[in-house]
């Protein structure tokens, strides 16, 4: 049975919803190890805020008291070009064996536009979380399962609709937010 889960993202900044999704994965799937995969140069968006190194530091603070083993995998920092999930998965498989790959429902809705999505679902077990304010992902899951002859697990937990760009704007305006862990907020304030 798979006991490792990988959660990727820009984490710019890491926020409480990332932690809640990770906790729900641990609870629902019996995960024993969580691998965090911060994006270095994602093909679908420009990272506007913090450097890769600082985002890794925020992740360390945010997950320091997590109930299972946490590892931050920095393989994307080794590639100066675009980093695609389909290219990263074989590398991750060598490092961790079989694992669950966690994505949000908003990402699943445009999953067919990702680079080689049919390879992604063959290389790993994809688990998806619905997000409040977005349409249900069940129709897309059914469509993709038929199209690519795979299984995609819809998790029970439904996440809040939290935006990292909104959090960055609030912080830029000097407003505190309860959407990020206190340790991360302290780190951000120290860095100004």
Image (spheres, grey):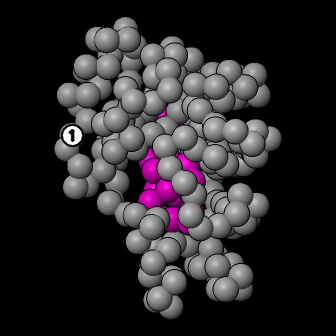
Nearest the camera: 158 or 118?
Answer: 118
Label 1, residues with CA under 10 Å away: few <14, some 14-19, many ≥20: some
Q: Quadrant of residue 57?
A: bottom right
Q: Is residue 65 visible?
A: no
Q: Establish if 73 lies above or below 59.
A: above
Determine the residue positioned at 31% across, 11% down.
Answer: 147
Residue 15 in magenta stretch:
yes
Name the main secondary structure of what is drawn in magenta: helix
Question: Percent x, y for residue 26?
Answer: 52, 43
Residue found at the very far right of the displayed protein: 78
Question: Percent x, y for residue 59?
Answer: 66, 60
Residue found at the very far top of the displayed protein: 149
Magenta span:
9-31
Q: Quadrant of residue 48?
A: bottom right
Q: Secondary structure at mark 1?
A: loop
Nearest the camera: 12 or 185?
Answer: 12
Q: Which residue is mark 1?
A: 136
**Drawn side of residue 156 relative to residue 46, left or right:** left
């Amino acid at each position: 049975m798979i006991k490792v889960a990988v959660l990727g993202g820009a984490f710019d900044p890491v926020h409480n919803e990332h932690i809640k999704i990770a906790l729900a994965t641990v609870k629902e799937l019996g995960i024993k190890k969580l691998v965090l995969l911060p994006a270095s140069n994602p093909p679908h968006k420009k990272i506007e805020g913090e450097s890769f190194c600082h985002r890794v530091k925020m992740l360390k603070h945010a997950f320091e008291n997590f109930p299972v083993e946490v590892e931050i995998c920095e393989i994307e920092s080794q590639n100066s070009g675009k980093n695609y999930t389909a290219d990263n998965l074989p590398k991750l498989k060598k490092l961790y064996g079989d694992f669950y790959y966690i994505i949000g429902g908003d990402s699943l809705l445009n999953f067919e536009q990702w680079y080689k999505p049919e390879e992604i679902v063959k290389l790993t077990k994809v688990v998806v979380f619905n997000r409040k304010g977005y349409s249900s992902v069940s129709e897309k899951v059914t469509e993709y399962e038929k199209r690519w002859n795979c299984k995609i697990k819809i998790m029970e937990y439904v996440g809040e609709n939290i935006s990292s760009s909104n959090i960055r704007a609030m912080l830029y305006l000097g407003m505190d937010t309860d959407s990020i862990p206190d340790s991360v907020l302290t780190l951000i304030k120290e860095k100004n």
